[in-house]
Amino acid sequence: MATQTLIYIFVGLSFALYIGIAIASRAGSTSEFYVAGGGVNPVVNGMATAADWMSAASFISMAGIIAFSGYDGSVYLMGWTGGYVMLALLLAPYLRKFGQFTVPDFIGTRYYSKAARVVAVICLIFISFTYIAGQMRGVGIVFSRFLDVPITLGVIIGMGIVFIYAVLGGMKGITYTQVAQYCVLIFAYMVPAFFISFLITGNPVPQLGLGSTVNDGSGLYVLQKLDLVLQDMGFAAYTDGSKSMIDVFCITAALMIGTAGLPHVIVRFFTVPKASDARKSAGWALVFIALLYTTAPAVGAFARLNFIDSVQDTDYAEAPAWFKNWESNDLIAWRDKNGDGKMQLGKGDPFQGAPQFTTSTGPSGERVVENAAANDNPNEVYVDRDIMVLANPEIANLPGWVIALVAAGGLAAALSTAAGLLLVISSSISHDLLKSTFRPQITEKGELLAARLAATAAIVVAGYLGIYPPGWVAQVVAFAFGLAAASLFPAIFMGVFSKRMNREGAIAGMVTGLTFTFLYIGWFKLWSPESNVAANWLFEISPEGIGVIGMLLNFAVAIAVARFTSPPPKEIGWLVDKIRVPRG
Amino acid sequence: MSDKDPDKSAEGGATSGAEKAYWAQNLRLLWTLMSIWFVVSFGAGILFRDFLDQFALGGYPLGFWFAQQGAIYFFILLILFYSIRMKQIERQYDLDD
């Protein structure tokens, strides 16, 4: 059967499955809509959390980033898993014991303040929308490349699917679709990884394959060979990387703490029956996540080797089909700087910026770009990092059904995360802003309707961001983690571990952390991108890692302010005591 | 570590003796496990990576292995251990859920 037909079948079947599950698990009450009634099995919740957490960035982008940055890619591997230790040990069981519906619920109640709740809602909405725009871009890429539909139509189909199960099913529908989506995405990730690991090293387990020798008779280990090949071509060694140690340290820390402070991840732990289940569930979530995260570095390394093998010094006329397919999707470009008709790879950008294609073709038949060539390096090939995972099966010549599987997996990853984000946005509006702040007299039915309307509105905004991605979307992903680390995490953490922390301290801390991080990232990413070089950074920390400093400021300001203002009322002390013990 | 800073001086209040002892034991366990968490990721994977890279685990330089594989395995073990140990502590003080 043709690959294209297989892709339609796989994607179609997976969509039918999601909708079927959604119809079977409609939400009838606000408790079911917000937290799936609080009765989800911890293992099931772990799986749903894994799908919720692993987004288009994890599935589509991460291995590609690692492939091109080697050791530096470790920041994502450690950063996006280490946060679960903080969640399981420092936050999840206490938040579950507290037992409400949303993160602003906790902050508003613990700090006895509507202002604190509203500040938390603002942080949450900003974090979640930044994040969701990236998911919709992922949906768009998969649709346009694999299903041959325009990006706009692809995003609209994706919106339609999410609409059905997020708006109808709420958290209940999302939970069970996420379980299905986890199965689809992990299978889709592992199958090609097994194949490729076996082809390159003879060992089908990618985690072991990456530490094995290449079976090309050279007797070299995979990482040794990569180091040699890359250094030969003028790159830094794969196992070395080029970021400074303090930057690697801070980015890893910001991603970890940010993960622990992300509202759509935290609310998943409100859905299990007991506090001890929240710990167990975080452990299971990390097991399911680790399966992909320990495979990704192998996928990245193998992809880099295969990519160099099939492109370096190849005549463009004989370039493999996948190369031309992705070129026609604007994600690969070749500019024959030395005019020899062959493609050369090297360090540096082949030309300035993302490729601007013209309608004409060059002497070898390539699509001509109008960008000014960068003549200080020999590199001729532009590759968007996002294509590596998607193109990997084609690069390794795997059968058509594997390619179809990867398309369905990429969509599962993007849609499951998008749904989780939509849910926290809609519940923060209907529950925190309406029910708890501005219209406390609203009925349960009215609140449920408001939640569904808010989810619908959020889908439309997310879809718009996916179809017309503002230029800054890719630039501000750092925002989501930096802001979560600098605003929500310290407020929740101190809410559990310090009885002395009061309303004034928490609000001052959140506002300081948020403002500082927002301005720092905004300055280097949005308003003055030309000054975004290490020499201008504070302590050589890049905008991606600055959330850590924001968090420290938050703690410092909160503790100082709390010391000079009156302690929280007695009831808050009792509340904290109650949160700290599982019984009751 | 910074995330441990907030003062514990305000502990106490209307809690029972068992709850206080339970919480103190929980905090000790948290300190130990979070220290290991820090050592396997930030320590082995970042700060002491160059030193560890002179040793090898199969084809992996050891520091690189911690950064891209090992830290994640340790994270799982940490949560598993905490989950089991806390259940025991909670039973001991008759505070389990």
Image: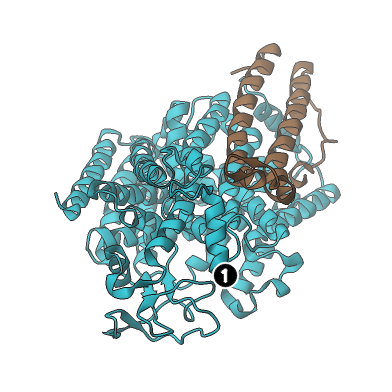
Chain colours: A cyan, B brown
The residue nearer to you, when weighing A275 against A432, is: A275
Q: Secondary structure at mark 1?
A: loop
Residue B27 in the image: above or below residue A153:
above
**Going by the image, does A208 lie left or right of A92?**
left
User: In which quadrant is the C terminus of chain A drawn?
Assistant: top right
The residue nearer to you, when weighing A115 against A26, is: A26
Horizontal and vertical percent position of residue A277: 53, 25
> At label 1, which amino acid type do we have?
Gly
Residue corresponding to mark 1: A234
**Going by the image, does A356 lie left or right of A540?**
left
Residue B32 in the image: above or below residue A447:
above
Horizontal and vertical percent position of residue A144: 27, 63
Chain identifier of the residue bearing label 1 in the image: A
The residue lying furthest to the left in this view is A1
- For the point 22% across and 51% down, the residue is A7
Horizontal and vertical percent position of residue A571: 71, 33
The residue nearer to you, when weighing A536 against A345, is: A345
The residue nearer to you, when weighing A27 against A442, is: A27
Horizontal and vertical percent position of residue A19: 25, 42
Specify whether residue B20 is in view: yes
Specify whether residue A132 is in view: no
- For the point 68% across and 31% down, the residue is A575
